[in-house]
Amino acid sequence: MSIRRVMPDIRSEAMEESRGFYELLGFEEVMNLGWVMTLASPSNPTAQITFMSHDKTAPVVPDVSVEVDDVDAAYAVMRANGAEIVHPLQDEEWGVRRFFVRDPNGSVVNVVGHR
């Protein structure tokens, strides 16, 4: 299993203001579903930051997202090691397969793969 990218997820009630602020640093919007928005560096597209007002299908907003090449293998490893699954492995309508797991610090990690 390899990691494709890691990005912070920030809970936000100020999506427009956040976009404007991070545009000052050179970020551009690459995805916006209304409740979740991702900004990326045009010169380094894997340098990203995500803002969420809520999560459409999960009970919590994650703290960080880790994109992997094999989300099913990552899920199996986490379950086999007794990690707390916060949101079960599932396909989402916006084209990803993901699950949430709690790390030892209490942070919620969105482990995601693109379909």
Image (cartoon, rainbow, N blue to C red):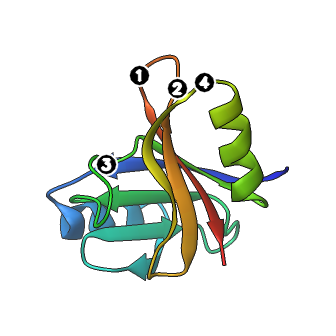
Please report whichever mark, 3 or 2, sits nearer to the chain's N-terminal start.
3
Residue under label 1, please give it: 106
Q: Is residue 99 left or right of residue 24?
A: right
Residue nearest the observer in this picture, 8 or 19: 8
Q: What's the CA distance linking mark 3 and mark 1?
A: 13 Å
- The reply to whether the C-beta atoms of the residues labelled 3 and 4 are less than 8 Å apart is no
In the image, which disc is placed on residue 4? none
In the image, what residue occupies the spot 36% across and 70% down?
37
- Residue drawn where x is 22% and y is 65% of the image: 15
Q: Earlier in the sequence, mark 3 or mark 1?
A: 3
Q: Which mark is residue 61?
A: 3
Give residue 23's quadrant in the image: bottom left
Q: Of callouts 3 and 4, which one flags the residue occurring earlier in the amino acid sequence?
A: 3
Front residue (pair 4, 70): 70
Picture quarter containing residue 31?
bottom left
**Residue position for label 2:** 103
Residue 24 falls left or right of residue 47? left
